[in-house]
Amino acid sequence: MSIYQELKARQFIYQETDAENIEKLLATEKVTFYVGFDPTGNSLHVGHLLPIMAMRILQQAGHVPIVLVGGATARIGDPSGRISARPILTVDEINHNVECLKSQLSRFIKVEAGQCHFVNNADWLCQLNYIDFLRDIGPKFSVNRMLAQDSVKQRLENGLSFLEFNYSILQAYDFYHLNKTLGCKMEFGGQDQWGNMVSGVELTRKMTQQEVFAMTFPLLLDSNGQKFGKTAGGNNVWLDVERTSVFDYYQFWRNCEDVQLEKLLFTFSTLPVNEIKRLAAGTTAQELNRAKEILAYEATCLAHGADAAGKAFVTAGTKFGFADPECTIATSSKVAQINPRTAVAAALPTVAIPADKFENGEIWVVKLLVEAGMCNSNGDARRLIQGGGAYINDERIASADATVKIADLNGDGMVIKAGKKSMKRVILG
């Protein structure tokens, strides 16, 4: 599968300026391409991740990304997809946000010299002479065509300032500048950027007589038609752990809708396409929930690292149960290397039961609950069992007459649970 075919299979492609030549270019050249991010906040959120994931895939295929942070264009504000103007930020706020975004983006792509370029359009846009810019660039743009762009038309009813009207021209100039200085041949972005991106392609072609291209990704929407990346309460899910904890980030993906599962695995994990199709085609609750665990782990691993993702997986499973505690569903995800029972046990308070508490190699389960401090008396333990609230290794204790063998406490021991929250690991002392 070529890189173009993979992008298509993973449903990244929405619009292209020239599909045939884009496919040929990506197959025959080491392409330098760019994706732009305006630093209007100090953190990226889930809604930004689609172009980031595409950038990651392209880089892994040998192409070279340019990460453009809009230190200059953020002072204007992109009108695309908005019904009102963005708040005007100070230069200090923008510079702070630029550094925050650089740090977050480095989690997804390789940032070493030669493999990636980080650029800030303030370095060239803020140096432009206004009269020279109007004379050299202005004639290349048709006001009629600019007014026909969706991002402009949607704002005309509510009012569009001349400041924002200039945004498309400046974004187009970015492409021309990056082509001239870094040999950039492609721009990638969200579908709401199509008009701005086409303007950049046309300006660059007119100024350099070179063939350059643009591709957009589809906007992700939930079942209610709202932009993907918000919690049930309407709040953004951020990459900054001070704004969205790692556990909440994991749970956002774990709680995704069934109908979105395949699409999210395609775009927000690096698992093979055929494996994703198999996982998302599950018909039982166990299969679908395991696929969601895999999605949540993979997405959290990319954003916060394997250790944090593993802890979130274990914490969530401890609270709400694991979809596949025996790891019977095949996956190439490294979450399969985490043994749920061992991981949970290692994180729990541990109680050692002396060998002399066992008779003929066994201990009465009621006595075990008391010895482990889960119940205050034999009567309490009986009532807990009869009420269905006592568990050993996630299996409900069916009878108060049951016994536990001393061999069951060897190695990592066992996990006993009283109710939904009280859990301990029991080993042989």
Image (cartoon, helix red, strand yellow):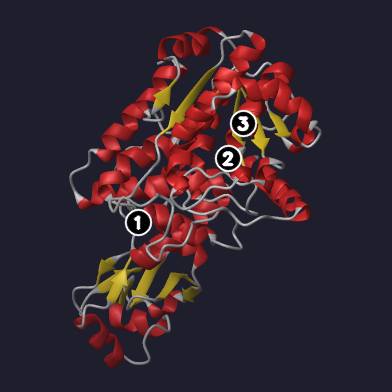
Question: Which one is in front, 133 or 7?
Answer: 133
Q: Residue at x 43, y 78 (%)?
A: 356
The residue lying at 48 percent from left, 34 percent from top is 147
SS for callout 1:
loop
The image shows residue 342, relative to residue 75, as above or below, that is below
Q: Position of residue 121 (x, y in %)?
A: 72, 35
Amino acid type at image mark 1 = Asn
Residue 255 numbered mark, or none: 1
Q: Amino acid at mark 2?
A: Phe
The residue that appears at 27% across and 39% down in the rendered structure is 280
Is residue 332 among the parts visible in the rendering? no
Mark sitting earlier along the chain (3/1): 3
Residue 72 seen in this snapshot: yes
| Residue 130 position in % (x across, y down) | 77, 32
Indicate which label's residue lies in the foreground, 2 or 1.
2
Q: In this picture, is 233 found above or below 209?
A: below
For this rendering, which residue is in front, 231 or 215?
215
Q: Residues within 10 Å of mark 1 (few under 14, many from 20)?
A: some
Is 289 displayed left or right of 129 in the figure?
left
Viewer-closest of 81 and 368: 81
The residue singled out by tag 3 in the image is 169
Q: Which residue is mark 2?
A: 165
Residue 166 falls in image quadrant: top right
For disc 2, the neighbor class at 10 Å (few under 14, some 14 to 19, many from 20) is many
Q: Is residue 299 above or below residue 369?
A: above
Give the side of residue 48 with respect to residue 401, left or right.
Answer: right
Q: Is residue 323 left or right of residue 410?
A: left
* Front residue of this view, candidates 123 and 31: 123
- What amino acid type should be assigned to the residue bearing mark 3? Ile
